[in-house]
Image: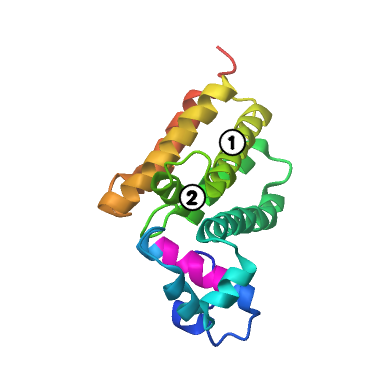
């Protein structure tokens, strides 16, 4: 499940939330479980306890609904990180390691990373959801560079790219062979990679 709080898919329709919120929550869950193209607006409306007319009143097209789902996934991630970050205040390297662990744990579920999955399913570069995903991924990379630099690690941009590619590949691995496969080694690999960029002091 992707950040639906205590609500399971079957509970969304009777949650008492406003129709728009129910539609977004149902769409996020269905898109993640079954894919963007396999889920139609009828299924989303039914899961949300509403109808297509109401859905289209809030979202002029399915593409715009997909984009909003991606936008909320990104926003939820940022909000959650803002709650974790203060626990590492004053220790740049600890903050970097917490960022990497948090990022991987938050995105690693039975179906991998929701954003990466969506990007693969949306080859049209002009799709509104692509812009949301690409903007977030760029910001994720920039954040990683900044944290590497703050931690005084060598070649921070190279390290950030290595970490980015490592985590993106791990998300794909989770979906193809499960979390107990190569992705289970991610914490150790990250530690070794960061250590290799740590400046050596003394003789």
Q: Main secondary structure of the magenta part?
A: helix
Q: Is residue 29 magenta?
A: yes
Residue 1 in view in this figure:
no
Q: Position of residue 58 (x, y in %)?
A: 63, 69
Position of 179 compared to 9: left or right?
A: left
Count the marks: how many? Answer: 2
| Residue at 46% from the left image edge and 69% from the top image edge | 41
Compared with 174, 193 (above or below) is above
Residue at the extreme top: 203
- Label 2 neighbourhood size at 10 Å, few (<14), some (14-19), many (20+)? many
Q: What is the magenta range?
A: 23-32
Camera sees residue 41 = yes
Q: Secondary structure at mark 2?
A: helix
| Residue at (32% x, 46% y) in the render | 173
Horizontally, residue 186 falls left or right of residue 59, namely: left
CA distance for labels 1 and 2: 13 Å
Q: Quadrant of the C terminus?
A: top right
Residue identified by numbered label 2: 115
User: Residue visible at 55% across and 40% down?
Assistant: 134
Residue position for label 1: 138
Which residue occupies the foreground of this view, 188 or 75?
75
């Amino acid at each position: 499940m992707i950040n639906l709080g205590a609500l399971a898919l079957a509970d969304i329709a009777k949650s008492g939330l406003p129709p728009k919120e129910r539609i977004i929550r149902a769409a996020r869950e269905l898109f993640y479980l079954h894919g963007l193209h396999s889920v139609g607006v009828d299924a989303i409306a039914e899961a949300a306890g509403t109808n297509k007319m109401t859905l289209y009143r809030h979202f002029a097209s399915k593409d715009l609904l997909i984009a909003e789902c991606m936008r909320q996934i990104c926003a939820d991630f940022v909000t959650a990180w803002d709650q974790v970050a203060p626990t590492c205040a004053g220790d740049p390297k600890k903050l970097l390691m917490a960022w990497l662990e948090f990022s991987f744990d938050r995105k690693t579920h039975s179906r991998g990373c929701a954003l990466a999955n969506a990007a693969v399913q949306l080859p049209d570069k002009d799709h509104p959801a692509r812009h949301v995903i690409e903007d977030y991924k760029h910001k994720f990379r920039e954040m990683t560079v900044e944290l590497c630099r703050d931690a005084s690690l060598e070649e921070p941009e190279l390290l950030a790219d290595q970490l980015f590619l490592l985590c993106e590949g791990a998300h794909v691995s989770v979906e193809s062979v499960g979390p107990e496969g190569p992705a289970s080694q991610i914490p150790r690999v990250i530690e070794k990679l960061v250590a290799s960029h740590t400046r050596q002091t003394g003789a």
